[in-house]
Image: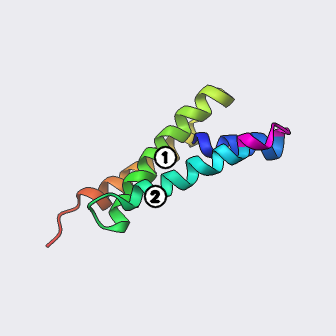
Amino acid sequence: MGGGYLIWLWLREGKPWWLGLFGAVILVGYGIVATCQPSNFGRVYAAYGGIFITLAVIWGWKVDGKPDKFDLLGAAIALLGIAIILYAPRK
């Protein structure tokens, strides 16, 4: 969340370029960390997606104010899908 926000500040709010660079480093690090996980690609990204969605709603709550019912409903549906991907019984 922070990396994307720093790039947003640089490009959209006219903040210093080094904030955008730092944001890019954070985003690249986020991508590298996923490759260090022992599970397969799809499940790892589903888990990261769940974390990202949860943090996005919390971040939006702090930055933009209280999320509306559709923000919360959409996040809940996405998290349910992620739970199915991660915990469905497989052969």
| Label whose residue precedes the other's in the sequence (2 or 1) | 2
Residue 2 in which image quadrant:
top right
Q: Horizontal and vertical percent for residue 68?
A: 60, 34
Q: Position of residue 18 (x, y in %)?
A: 74, 42
- As measured in the structure, the alpha-carbon distance from the residue carrying label 2 to the one carrying label 1 is 15 Å
- Taking the spot 49% from the left edge, 52% from the top edge, the residue there is 30
Query: What secondary structure is found at the residue carrying circle 1?
Result: helix
Label 1 packing within 10 angstroms: few (<14), some (14-19), many (20+): some
Determine if the magenta segment contains residue 15: yes
In this picture, which residue range is highlighted in magenta? Answer: 13-19
71 or 10: nearer the viewer: 10
Mark 2, residue position: 32
**Going by the image, does 72 lie left or right of 43?**
right
Q: Residue at x 83, y 38 (%)?
A: 13
Q: Which dot marks residue 61? A: none
Which residue is depicted at the point 36% across and 67% down?
Answer: 41
Q: Is residue 56 left or right of residue 88?
A: right
Image quadrant where one finds the C terminus: bottom left
The residue that mark 1 highlights is 52
